[in-house]
Image (cartoon, rainbow, N blue to C red):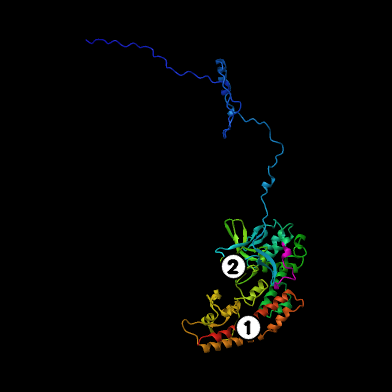
Amino acid sequence: MATPVASPLLLPLPAPAFPPRRVASTQRLLLAHPPRAGRPRLREPPPPVEEAAPAAVEEAYDAPPLRLLDPPHEDEPYPDEMEAADPDFYRIGYARMMRAYGIEFLEGPDGMGVYASRDVEPLRRARVIMEIPLELMLTITKKHPWMFFPDIVPLGHPIFDIIESTNPETDWDLRLACLLLYAFDVEGNFWQLYGDFLPSGDECTSLLLAPKEDLMELEDQDLSSEMLKQQKRAVDFWQKHWHKAIPLKLKRLAPDHERFLWALSIVQSRSFNLKMRMGAFLQDANVLAPYADMLNHSPNANCFLHWRFKDRMLEVMIKAGRSVKKGDEMTIDYMSAVNSTLMQRYGFSSSTNPWELINFSSPAKIHLDSFLSVFNIAGLHDELYHNATLTSGESTFVDGGVVAAARTLPTWSDGDLPAVPSVERKSAQALQEECRKMSESFSTTIQQDEEILDSDEPIRKTREIAIKYRLHRKLLLQKIIDSLDIYQDRILF
């Protein structure tokens, strides 16, 4: 039989020994102002805390909670009229000006030009000499719809209707001429001031302003008839749109056809084509750029134009590796064209134009490689150049006229087949004789034209450039004759 076991006595457990409760003061529980975030500040040490009575502690627990969640308290309401802190901060538009580095604008033999005011050593990269902002230029896109940069034509102005009526393929110069005339009429526009630097009607060399008797001085029937067509085209356009019933704000832009012809001549002789990147779009535009339009033409130019799209700035830059001396003229290459094209567009010609052509009718031909080796001319037909480093005594003779002779003379080349000296001399003499006949076909000689240009009698600009055009043609013929003389003397037996 199992013996019962006595159960242990269940005694109450002792109470846990909690640490004594700390009595906090009322000053620490009540906050008069909500705490603020930020860097801690150095303050004086707080005063000693006084112990509070138990009754005060109970009252402190019954106090309202912190005011962090209370609505904000506005000590000072907003004023009735709000004023901007900085009014200039809200002006979005601003004006930029042109900048030039190491150049000066001077009167030269061919009118106003850009010249170096200091020596420039050659560098591996191009160097900026001019910066022209978009705000100062006049531009219009080449394709429809027409876009202007900057957009100075207000909505609904009748000049836009005239621009819209032009032929999109051929009338780029008429559109830009209308835009130029409008810029002269806009109050405060930059071109109102820059117009003082543009040549007047009497100083302009464009054949658009030449009378018929001056065009006859060219002694080039094709060029003179083409310029008469261009003059008629401009006058017909003016008569169509500047009639008596047009509003005054349009009539005052071109009160007579001479004013429109002058604007058209400025556009043709001083504008250029440029690919302009506007945001994500690449626009082909016709551009009139102030100050850059004073750069004259040279086939061996030392500068070029560059569009800096990030801030819409046109840069004129010296080519990499080119050294410039103080007083040298800064030039750009307008185009590679014959003198008749340069006269029609820009109003000038050159006797050393390497792209000038003479049409020969004689069947005689000279050996191309032999002629090029005599004058140290290298390169392909469209890229011929004179290698001056290999030249000794004839460095003053070889110029663009000799390069033009290499392009325009009838030549032959048959691989490794050498030239026969006797045959080459006979062909050179035949070509010389044809050049003399072409020179004799002019009504004046080289000496007579030079006397007219050097005389003190006043002469119209258009007549002056017409005489220079025929003089340059005769000088090129003489250059070809002299080149063939040197070729006959130096050809190998």
Against 21, residue 434 (above or below) is below
Residue 385: image location, x then y, percent: 56, 75
- Is residue 492 in sight in this rendering? yes
Please tell me which residue lies in front, 313 or 387.
387
Is residue 203 part of the magenta span, yes or no?
yes
Residue 1 image position (x, y, % from top left): 21, 10
What residue is pinned by disc 1? 478
Helix or strand or loop: what does disc 2 sit on? loop
Q: Which residue is mark 2?
A: 323
Residue 118 included in the magenta stretch of the image: no
Residue 401 x %, y %: 60, 78
Using a 10 Å C-alpha cutoff, classify the residue at mark 2 as few (fewer than 14 neighbours), some (14 to 19) or many (20 or more). some
Q: Main secondary structure of the magenta part?
A: loop
Kind of residue sitting beneath label 1:
Gln
Image point (32%, 11%), residue name: 8
Regarding residue 384, the answer to whether it shows in the image is no
Residue furthest out toward the left: 1
Residue 30 is marked as none
| Amino acid on which disc 2 is placed | Ser
* Residue 56 placement (x, y as % from top left): 57, 17
Residue 331 quadrant: bottom right
Q: Is residue 434 above or below residue 171?
A: below
Which residue range is magenta in the image?
194-207
Return the residue nearer the eye: 116 or 477.
116
- Residue at mark 1 to residue at mark 2: CA–CA distance: 32 Å
